[in-house]
Image: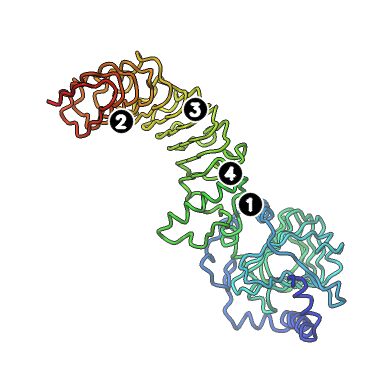
Amino acid sequence: MTLRELGASYFKTWKGKILLAATLLAAVLFVCFFADTLALNTYVPKAGQSVIDTFYSEYNPAEETANQIQLSKTYASLTANQEAWTSAEDGLTEGIFCISSEYMEYLVYQIDSADIAAQGKSFGDFNHLWIDSKSDSFYAVLNISGKQIDLTDYYILIRDATGLYGSRAILNFYEAESVNLTNAIVMGTVLAPYAEILCDGASVYGQLKGKELSGETEFYKDLRFTGYRSVMDNLNVLSLKNDAVRIAAIEYLINNDPDYKYQDYTISSAVRVRDAGAVKKININAQDVVFDALEEDLTLFPNLEEITVSGGVLPSFSLEKLPGIKSLAITGTNLEILDLSAATELERLVLDDNPSLTTLDFTNNSKIKILSYSGTPLGWLDYSPLPELYYLDCSNSRVRDYLTISGENLQNVRMLDISGNNNIQTFYLQTFPLLESVNCSNCSILELDFSNSANLTYFKGSYNRLTDIDFRGASNLRFIEAYGGTVTSLDLR
């Protein structure tokens, strides 16, 4: 049974009719006879405070500013998760019901004032609006369209007739030019930033926020809507075009949650805007992405530092809108074009197994410390723009020009892998003064000079054209692999 059917069937019963009539009558009696007396003899909160104690009751940034227009736009942008329904089709007392039969804390309704509940009716066809949920800690946002809103003699109730829940709902008339609340009973906040609000004779348990107020209220108890942060934290979510990015962000939050702030997330959750800044790493498979929208999705994480993309179709990628990225790894794709010009903070770049990548410009990336492009056709590059580079892997990258295999522009390199480039014949090992680890296996090297290799601890050089290898300058070597090919002798003195 749907929510509408459930509510309608209940209000058809004699109990439902009695409850509805009793609630409306109680509201009228409360306002007419008891409101002032009760206010005088019970705790009355200061203006702007809530009688409902909540964790967020003191957090109220937007409501305290003059920017009601932006606040209204923010609420209006929320996606509806509930539908309003009416009892009109059942011949009962005609009302509009924003009542959730589920235990939902955060309710968002989008109501067309000219076609309420898709019945072709307007507010003039009803006389009351009732807001409630099974949850005792609910907040409701009603986004209502229409230029001219007439709620004369209306009853707008939140849960019951006491008015104590006036802090739990906001009626956002985001495009209204006039809102008529004459002689109405209003529980909740009315937000109409472009409108004149007519409130003569109205009884208000909430707040009236409009461009202009006219008339004198019969009763006004200032209760602000305390759900701003709760609603926005939970319903203001990122609009991501790539589900793989959403899943990767959630996995990061779940796996990096020492304070249990993200324990309510599941793999099917949307990513809340408030949590986007906590995501530092995104790891995705390009087979699951719409590459045209990937960069746009990633920009929604303002503190993102590491991006890993593996496999699939990704012909181009740019960090133009992600200048703060420190680590980028794109492997096993059809990447052809990579724009790193804006990524001045980049420290780690891994581009392994991208067979279509033939050019790479890191002129503006002087902070790169780790560079790997194994399995690409890039060959040996000009590394002079990378003074801090200490790890370089260009294995199996079609290095051809042996004259450039030197450390003149790589004075800080500690780890070097040039293996699998069988065109390399001469490797000026002695020009890498800080080298600690080297792999030059499966090349065509004829001679090696270890005279300036005091820091070298790890050497792999199997299957070359070497015959005699003199390691005497590498006094700290701990690992040697040099078999196969033409090797006949090793000098380890």
Answer few, some or many: residues within 10 Å of disc 4's Cα (few below 14, many 20 plus, some between 14 and 19): some
The vertical placement of 373 against 302, above or below, is above
N-term-proximal mark, 1 vs 2 = 1
- Whether residue 61 appears in this view of the structure is yes
What's the amino acid at mark 2? Met
- Between disc 3 and disc 1, the foreground one is 3
The residue wearing badge 2 is 415
The vertical placement of 104 against 390, above or below, is below
Label 4 and label 2: CA atoms lie apart by 34 Å
Could you tell me which secondary element the residue under label 3 belongs to?
loop
Label 1 and label 4: CA atoms lie apart by 40 Å
Answer few, some or many: residues within 10 Å of disc 2's Cα (few below 14, many 20 plus, some between 14 and 19): many
Answer few, some or many: residues within 10 Å of disc 3's Cα (few below 14, many 20 plus, some between 14 and 19): some
N-term-proximal mark, 3 vs 1 = 1
Label 2 and label 3: CA atoms lie apart by 25 Å
Q: Give x and y (percent) for residue 481.
A: 25, 30
What's the amino acid at mark 3? Ser
Foreground: 155 or 433?
433
The residue wearing badge 3 is 341
Which image quadrant: the C terminus? top left
The residue wearing badge 1 is 67
Whether residue 291 sits left or right of residue 194 in the image: it is left
Residue at 62 percent of width and 69 percent of height: 138
Q: Give x and y (percent) for residue 62.
A: 59, 55
Q: Give x and y (percent) for residue 234.
A: 58, 60
